Amino acid sequence: MKNKPAPNGRKCTVLIVDDHPLLRDGLAKVINQQSDLAVCGEAADARAGLAAVAKLRPDVAIVDLTMDEGNGLDLIKDLHLRQPDLPVLVLSMHHENLYAERAVRAGARGYVMKREPVAAVLAALRKVLAGQMAFSEETVRRLLDVPTRARKAAAESPADVLSDRELEVFRLLGQGFGTRQIAQKLRLATSTVETYRAGIKQKLGLARAPELVARAAQFVLDEPRR
């Protein structure tokens, strides 16, 4: 899939931040086949991604959320603080429903799941480069409905809205356990616990991790009285 050359003949430069070499290589090959896009660099973790952006000054960055070293959302926040005009497109294995709101709050301008065809990635790249947001219609509706959902969730008990596994993770958070410790206790992957945390925050209308931990701690304190 090719696109018309940029009006000034210059290709827009793309930085790929993902810890899977095969994905980076495959995506770079497709992007470099485009007449209006070119990969200027790659990074395998958040720290390297931050350094690459400072050195290479790409026109757009593609960022994975889950990496072996560093957190994609934290990287997006750092990039947004340092270069607020840099469009960031999230490319993740996690479902958009779970992480899109967090990505937007961090500063991302688009979200594509890795299971989507490469054409969707290219379309999203061009959208964010044009100053537009690249999210599904469902996510846009959810983003517009955040205040209403947050008010409703705040009035509900976690025990009423969370699944059994989510409630188990929530209780452990309230008892002071971190993500890695919870993963070990429940024999789950760390990324799975992160997904549960994201789902809990979404269901309870919580915006930030400290709010989640505080709500969980209060829940554990109040639980004997229930």
Image (cartoon, helix red, strand yellow):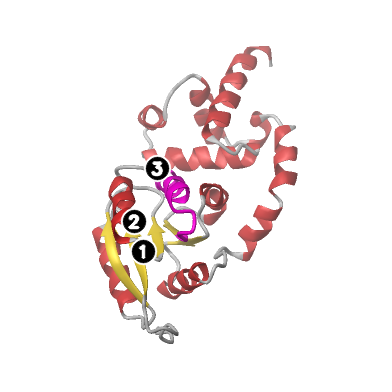
The quarter of the rendered structure image containing the C terminus is: top right
Packing grade of label 3 (10 A; few <14, some 14-19, many >=20) is some
Mark 1 and mark 3 residues within 8 Å of each other at the beta carbon = no
Q: In the displayed image of the protein, which residue is found farthest to the bottom?
A: 4
Q: Give the secondary structure at mark 1.
A: loop
> On the image, numbered disc 1 is attached to which residue?
58
Q: Amino acid at mark 1?
A: Pro
Is 10 colored magenta in this rendering?
Answer: no
Answer with left or right where residue 216 lies relative to residue 193. Answer: right
Q: CA distance from mark 1 to mark 3?
A: 28 Å
Q: Is residue 8 above or below residue 104?
A: below
Q: Which mark is residue 53?
A: 2
Mark 3 or mark 2, earlier in chain: 2
> On the image, numbered disc 3 is attached to which residue?
191
Q: Residue at x 68, y 58 (%)?
A: 141
Mark 2 or mark 1, earlier in chain: 2
Q: Is residue 104 above or below residue 216?
A: below
Q: Residue at x 45, y 69 (%)?
A: 125
Q: Kindly report which numbered mark, 1 or 3, lies closer to the viewer in this rendering.
A: 1
Residue 88 sits in quarter: bottom left
Q: Residue at x 57, y 64 (%)?
A: 133
Q: Nearer the viewer, residue 27 or 173?
A: 27
The boundaries of the magenta stretch are 71-88
Q: Residue at x 39, y 60 (%)?
A: 62
